[in-house]
């Protein structure tokens, strides 16, 4: 079964985890490492002849336009991760609408390909921000992959379920939701589909969970370029102990485990995965 491989392209200092201590106004003073970190992933994916969906943050694209061109030229799918990395819960509907449209136009211009997919910063589409789906549909997106079907203090919406489905539709086209993947066992949701848990959980548990999911449906795996970077500047002082743990735990495991993931599972872009599994998807 073809499963989806996705990368949220942002720099290490742009994560929500540091937002309280490191305001946006300080970003320009940080050392940018997103280009070499993303290239590390591009080289690995090329070696394994795997294509992925790269949800690129608009402000990263504006700062490093050559990176978007490189991603597209290597045959990967380019999607949007918004413009500013502000979580949707902190935005007005008009602000989100502007970001959804501006990032799509910018990424289409740089990549030379239509942008179909959206991934919200910090999975911030949930019950109280469902209006964002209407804005994505209006902006011309054909799928969203932003909802975690779990209960979590910062995000999540269990009612969305695990299965990709058409979540919004108007007269001319529809928007498919591909929820983030969790393995379910004895009523417990096990987060095996990427991010910090990929570095924290033992590889055998991740592999077991992903195999369990793909018996029923494709899984969607996600990671960030900064998770491959053991040399990144230490920003612990800008977050809590728990926040620092989440960011820095097991960085040395990312690349070797990714090798295992790429060897053991069949992976591709989100669009190819949805198409292969026969999910409804506009072909425009
Ligand atoms: Zn992000």
Image: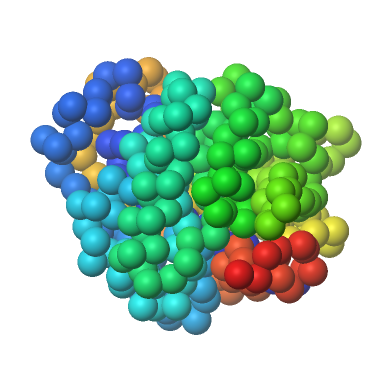
Q: Nearer the viewer, residue 192 or 131?
A: 131
Q: Position of residue 79 (x, y in %)?
A: 47, 57
Q: Is residue 163 above or below residue 88?
A: below
Q: Judge whether residue 133 can be spotted in this image.
A: yes
Q: Position of residue 231 (x, y in %)?
A: 23, 48
Q: Judge whether residue 44 can be spotted in this image.
A: no
Question: In screen coordinates, is 209 left or right of 260?
Answer: right
Question: In screen coordinates, is 118 left or right of 161?
Answer: left
Residue 207: name its quadrant.
bottom right
Residue positioned most to the right: 186
Q: Is residue 239 above or below residue 120?
A: above
Q: Nearer the viewer, residue 266 or 58?
A: 58
Q: Position of residue 156 (x, y in %)?
A: 65, 30
Query: Quarter of the image containing the N terminus?
Result: bottom right
Q: Is residue 230 above or below residue 88?
A: below
Q: Nearer the viewer, residue 1 or 90?
A: 90
Q: What is the image's colouring?
A: rainbow
Residue at point 70%, 63% (across, down): 281
Residue at point 60%, 20% (across, down): 153
Query: Quarter of the image containing the C terminus?
Result: bottom right
Residue at point 45%, 44% (across, down): 100
Q: Nearer the viewer, residue 79 or 212?
A: 79
Q: Is residue 23 above or below residue 200?
A: above
Residue at point 32%, 18% (across, down): 20
């Amino acid at each position: 079964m073809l499963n989806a491989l996705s990368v949220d392209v942002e720099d290490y200092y742009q994560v929500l985890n540091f937002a309280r201590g490191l305001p946006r106004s300080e970003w320009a003073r940080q050392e940018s490492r997103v280009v070499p970190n993303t290239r590390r992933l591009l080289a690995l994916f090329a070696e394994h002849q795997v294509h992925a969906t790269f949800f690129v943050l608009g402000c990263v694209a504006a700062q490093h336009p050559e990176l978007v061109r490189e991603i597209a030229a290597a045959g990967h799918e380019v999607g949007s991760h918004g413009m500013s990395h502000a979580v949707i819960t902190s935005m007005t509907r008009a602000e989100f609408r502007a970001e959804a449209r501006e990032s799509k136009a910018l990424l289409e211009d740089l990549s030379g390909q239509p942008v179909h997919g959206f991934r919200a910063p910090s999975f911030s589409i949930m019950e109280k921000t469902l209006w964002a789906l209407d804005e994505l549909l209006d902006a011309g997106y054909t799928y969203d992959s932003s909802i975690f079907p779990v209960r979590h203090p910062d995000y999540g919406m269990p009612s969305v379920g695990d299965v990709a489905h058409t979540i919004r539709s108007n007269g001319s086209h529809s928007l498919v939701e591909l929820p983030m993947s969790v393995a379910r066992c004895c009523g417990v949701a096990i987060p095996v589909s990427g991010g910090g848990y990929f570095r924290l959980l033992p590889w055998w548990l991740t592999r077991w969970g992903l195999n369990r999911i793909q018996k029923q449906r494709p899984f969607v795996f996600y990671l960030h370029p900064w998770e491959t970077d053991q040399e990144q500047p230490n920003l612990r002082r800008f977050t809590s102990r728990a926040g620092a743990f989440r960011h820095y735990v097991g960085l040395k495991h990312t690349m070797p485990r990714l090798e295992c993931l790429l060897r053991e599972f069949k992976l591709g872009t989100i669009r190819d995965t949805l198409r292969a599994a026969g999910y409804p998807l506009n072909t425009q």
